[in-house]
Image (spheres, rainbow, N blue to C red):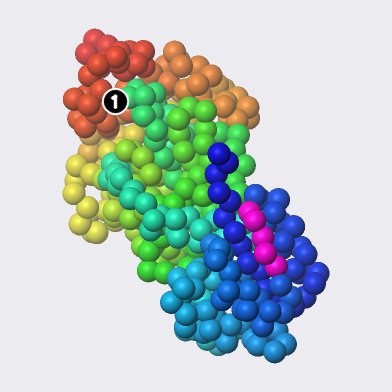
């Protein structure tokens, strides 16, 4: 038997908009009922034995505006819980407040992209269905990758580390690209984002369900789920610490391990993530400017009261000549270096250009071995007792490397 399709009711007096939205939703696989008259639509809604799963509703309509339509729907026990998205030509703050007070669940401008319309519809439907079934919660171990200097390989390490942990324990991991500005993780994994958390800027609920975030995730063949970053600088500016407060509880339920590309500069959202992460990998290159940036970052972390053992320096040899000795770097930082990743710039750049992570193209390289060993050190405390049987080849190799 085929799975029952979600049914959506569209109430829109513009025949052009009605046709356009209906065509999009049908193409996405929904059953659609459409009316260009709100009174006729309300008569149908209050008499049909098969209630819609969602209503898309215009604000300005003849005979009855969208606000009154919502009040009528919310006033009947049979229809009071049907999710409603208000559509409007011009997003006015007062209209938005009136719509939400009347009982709308979301608000969307008619100029919004089709991908945003798709996301909002999927998000509300997912939230509706999540209340109808129990969800097993997972509390992820979170590892943030950060630097105060660009060009030291933060995104590359985040991508390859997430894959390494997935391969070691044969589990799914979640990689969250939160590099403010221009995000690179999707590019490095040859994935194309459809929507990002910037679409949650005007989210009206106090929290975001796991099911909402899952609609944004991109699956990589390695077993990693990517939560893509903002597509451009303007979009990243929409993301705030409030967005982090909304997303953080749900993003921790997506996989046993959450790897976060936290970028290379301090911002309110970044600081929120770094504060909440279990571990911070502070990435630096073996050169003076990078060491100084890391020293400044450590001072900030200390001032914020971060535990000393939460921050682990990682030296990534992205340059081959005139480099500083790791022992001197550790002395300058007054902190032991957690991992040193060897130089292999040519292979790393090739992997990025191909959209295939280095750990997959060159699993036996020194760089891949170093990242696998780091992944093992970061995860073995929790995972060894759970995955003692049938170890993966990567796990056996990481054990040998650390005990040799």
Specify whether residue 33 is painted magenta: yes
Residue 184 drawn above or below residue 25: above
Q: Secondary structure at mark 1?
A: helix
- Quarter that holds the C terminus: top left
Q: Is residue 5 left or right of residue 225?
A: right
- Quarter that holds the N terminus: top right
Dividing the picture into quadrants, the one containing residue 280 is: top left
In the rendering, at what x and y percent does residue 380 appear?
A: 24, 27
* Label 1 Cα crowd, 10 Å radius (few <14 / some 14-19 / many 20+): many
Q: Is residue 219 left or right of residue 388?
A: right
Q: Is residue 58 visible?
A: no
* Residue at image coords 66%, 83%: 39
Residue 34 drawn above or below residue 134: below
* Residue at image coords 21%, 32%: 382
In the rendering, at what x and y percent does residue 190 appear?
A: 60, 34
Q: Is residue 209 visible?
A: yes
Dividing the picture into quadrants, the one containing residue 40 is: bottom right
For the stretch drawn in magenta, the main secondary structure is: strand
Q: Nearer the viewer, residue 65 or 327?
A: 65
User: In the rendered structure, which segment of residues is drawn in magenta?
Assistant: 30-34
Residue 360 drawn above or below residue 131: above
Q: Which residue is mark 1?
A: 376
């Amino acid at each position: 038997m085929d799975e029952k399709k979600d049914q959506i009711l569209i109430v829109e007096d513009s025949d052009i908009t009605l046709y356009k939205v209906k065509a999009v939703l049908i193409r996405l696989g929904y059953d659609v009922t459409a009316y260009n008259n709100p009174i006729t639509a309300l008569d149908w809604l209050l008499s049909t034995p098969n209630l819609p799963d969602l209503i898309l509703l215009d604000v300005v309509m003849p005979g009855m505006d969208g606000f009154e339509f919502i009040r009528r729907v919310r006033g009947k026990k049979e229809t009071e819980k049907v999710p409603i998205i208000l559509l409007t030509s011009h997003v006015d703050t007062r209209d938005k407040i009136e719509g939400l007070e009347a009982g709308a669940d979301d608000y969307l401008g008619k100029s919004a992209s089709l991908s945003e319309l798709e996301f909002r519809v999927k998000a509300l439907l997912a939230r509706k269905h999540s209340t109808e079934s129990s969800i097993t919660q997972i509390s992820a171990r979170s590892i943030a990758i950060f630097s105060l200097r660009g060009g030291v390989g933060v995104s590359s390490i985040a991508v390859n580390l997430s894959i390494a942990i997935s391969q070691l324990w044969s589990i799914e991991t979640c990689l969250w690209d939160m590099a403010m500005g221009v995000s690179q993780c999707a590019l490095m994994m040859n994935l194309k984002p459809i929507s990002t958390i910037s679409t949650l800027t005007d989210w009206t609920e106090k929290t975001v369900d796991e099911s909402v975030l899952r609609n944004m995730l991109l699956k990589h063949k390695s077993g990693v789920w990517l939560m893509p970053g903002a597509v451009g600088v303007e979009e990243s500016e929409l993301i705030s610490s409030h967005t982090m407060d909304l997303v953080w509880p749900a993003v921790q339920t997506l996989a046993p391990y959450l790897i976060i590309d936290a970028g290379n500069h301090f911002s309110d959202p970044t600081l929120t993530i770094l504060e909440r992460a279990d571990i911070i990998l502070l990435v630096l290159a073996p050169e003076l400017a990078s060491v100084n940036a890391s020293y400044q970052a450590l001072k900030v972390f200390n001032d914020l009261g971060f535990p000393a053992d939460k921050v682990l320096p990682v030296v990534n040899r992205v340059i081959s000549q005139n480099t500083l000795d790791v022992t001197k770097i550790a002395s300058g930082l007054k902190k032991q270096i957690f991992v040193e990743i060897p130089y292999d710039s040519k292979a790393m750049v090739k992997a990025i250009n191909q959209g295939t992570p280095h750990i997959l193209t060159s699993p036996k390289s020194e760089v891949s071995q170093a990242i696998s060993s780091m992944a093992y050190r970061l995860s073995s405390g929790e995972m060894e007792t759970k995955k003692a049987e049938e170890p993966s080849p990567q796990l056996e190799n990481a054990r040998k490397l650390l005990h040799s």
